[in-house]
Amino acid sequence: MSILPPNKKTKTIDTPKNFFIFGATMNGKSYLAGEFPNPLFLDTDGNASANPYPSIPLRNVRGKNGKITHSAVDQLDQIITELQTSKHTYETIILDVIDDIVVMIEQYVCDKAGVEALADIPFGKGYASFNSIFQQLVIELKALPLNIIYVSRIATFEENNVTIEKPSLKEKYVNVVNGNCDYMIQAKKIGKKYVRFVKDKRKNYTREGIDDERILAILDTVTGAFDKSKSASKREQDAIVKKMQEQEEEVLEESASEPQQGEKSKLYVDPPEAKELFEDLEVDPTKPPFTEPKQDSNPEGHPVSNRKRPKIK
């Protein structure tokens, strides 16, 4: 008996399950997320009391010594395990907001290592640990048989006198999240009107391919949800590729003109000249202008910050 499937097309069922929603505060992003069926909010910004839907507050809980005693990473692990193994009626999980969860993961990794920043962990191990935890979170959420919605705030910047809006989540993290999503949707308030429109999508979805009427009803309220991407003509494609190549060449030329490592900068002063410059100030140019503050260590040998923490009664 052949294990190969019949060589013919079949009708596809293609209901989007993963969404990235971003927008400014009070612009309707959480409201849109709440329209999805049977939602559970994983709340980070303290707005749970203003939300009629079930929610779990996510936070890093610290003890009197300032160390994290129960982390958001542990919470997320417990929540995902519970969703995988128990009977429940939730159909949608909403991370509101993913920006804060990223910060909490960074805090968790730094706290475990006893440092203030990921860069303080030698050999890039801090960034490696963070990336592993973050990517694993996204992959495990996607594996759930549920709708997953990531909510992010907004950032704006100017380019050629045009204001451009994008998620406030760092681009490298947006790439991880949006790479596992079907739609990126922006929620925006214009005057007294709330609008929602597609900024990016995985493919050209069709109404006929969506078998969940509730998801279809939500997408029908989103501008561009079912618009088809247009193919460029050969002439348009050639012009686009040429412009991209010119931009790449400009970047390479700028990089080549920058001083390479080991080259003397224009501000470099040889030791004999430096000695003359610093004689009047009675400063020894061969010594650093400051000494590094000593760091205490905790019982595990990890350096800890000398910054005073507020006393907890």
Image: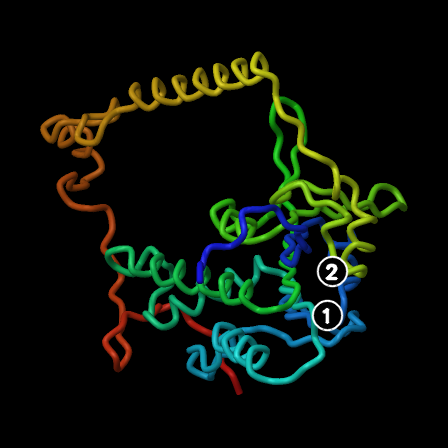
Residue 41, percent from left and from top: 68, 70
Which is more toward the observer, 286 or 124? 124
Q: Which residue is mark 1?
A: 39
The image quarter containing residue 147 is bottom right
The extreme front residue here reads 1
Residue 179, percent from left and from top: 53, 49
Q: Looking at the rendered structure, which numbered label has been put on residue 82?
A: none
SS under mark 1: strand
Which is more toward the observer, 157 or 52? 52
**37 displayed left or right of 63:** right
Residue at 71% across, 42% down: 198
Of label 1 and label 2, which has the lower sequence position? 2
Residue 231, percent from left and from top: 63, 25
The crowd level at tag 2 (other Cα within 10 Å; few <14, some 14-19, many 20+) is: many
Quadrant where the N terminus is found in the figure: bottom left
The extreme bottom residue here reads 313
Q: Are marks 1 and 2 in contact (CB under 8 Å)?
A: yes
SS under mark 2: helix
The kind of residue on which mark 1 rests is Pro
The extreme right residue here reads 192
- State whether residue 280 is above or below residue 149: above
The kind of residue on which mark 2 rests is Ala
